[in-house]
Amino acid sequence: MPQEIDFLIIHCGMLEPARILIRPMTTPFMKIAKLHVVCGCMSSGKSSELARLLRRAAYAKIPVYAFKPGTDTRDGAAVRSRDGHTHEARAIGRAFEALAIVPLNGPGLVGFDEAQFFDDSLVATAEDLLRRGYEVVCAGLDTDFRGEPFGPMAQLLARADDVNKLTAVCVRCGDRQATRSQRLINGEPAPYDAPTVLVGGEECYEARCRSCHEEPDLVHCAVFSCKEKPRDDYGV
């Protein structure tokens, strides 16, 4: 906080009272605290963007801490994207475990990959890290295969200072605005009551646009591609 200091100055051989306002010095790190959420469907580049942000912070000499859920054992102790970008990460069972690993006070950048797989304590953990002066980046699927909010992502998005929603290419029609993740079992859309958490890659999920995404409770209805939409009651 700025402080006012009273002192005396010599003016024309006489002492006169004066007052100045002293503002504390700031550094680029002092106002770094913010919550940044990177979200999107499968194959949209979420982990690649997180790895890029981590590398850039490290290059700027900012302390970096990266975490991933212990349930995701695909890539070992690393944030790894499909295009080959990686960054060292620590696997933890519960999100709040990060608080015992990250120093008490910032500055720094704390990244959480596959945030949708973390428990709900990720929200409180992120808020605690923000109060400590850290920038927090959470990357993950915003919706599950049903098209519903996935894990703690909805709460994180509501609290975010900055949101980067990425899209992919629809594997059905080639649309570049795919925002849904289609869960497949033996090549067919998963039923609604299938397990929500299944860690896998292209063999389990497909990126699809809204029109090509087959909602689990509608898989037995007629499915139209985004180029052959049905006419509604108004003839549109």
Image: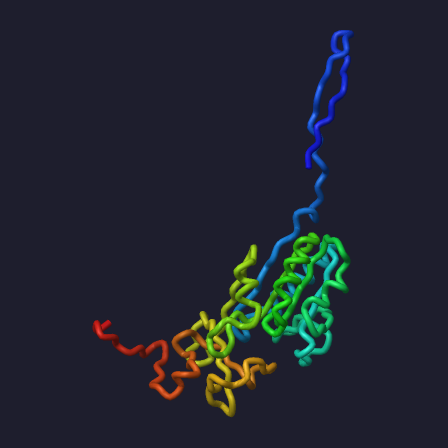
Q: Position of residue 194 (x, y in %)?
A: 51, 86
In the figure, 113 relative to 104: above or below?
Answer: below
126 or 35: nearer the eye? 126
Snapshot quadrant of residue 114 = bottom right
- Name the residue: 31% across, 77% down: 229
In the figure, 189 relative to 165: above or below?
Answer: below
159 or 80: nearer the eye? 159
**Quadrant location of the C terminus?**
bottom left
- Name the residue: 47% across, 86% down: 191
Snapshot quadrant of residue 11 = top right
Give the total of numbered labels: 0
Q: Which residue sits furthest left?
A: 234
User: How did the renderer colour the structure?
Assistant: rainbow
Q: Position of residue 177 (x, y in %)?
A: 45, 70
- Name the residue: 77% across, 11% down: 15
Q: Position of residue 122 (x, y in %)?
A: 63, 66
- Name the residue: 66% across, 51% down: 32
**Quadrant location of the N terminus?**
top right
Q: Which residue sits furthest bottom?
A: 186
Snapshot quadrant of residue 65 = bottom right
Going by the image, does 14 lie left or right of 225? right
35 or 224: nearer the eye? 35
Going by the image, does 122 lie left or right of 206? right
Q: Position of residue 54 (x, y in %)?
A: 68, 62
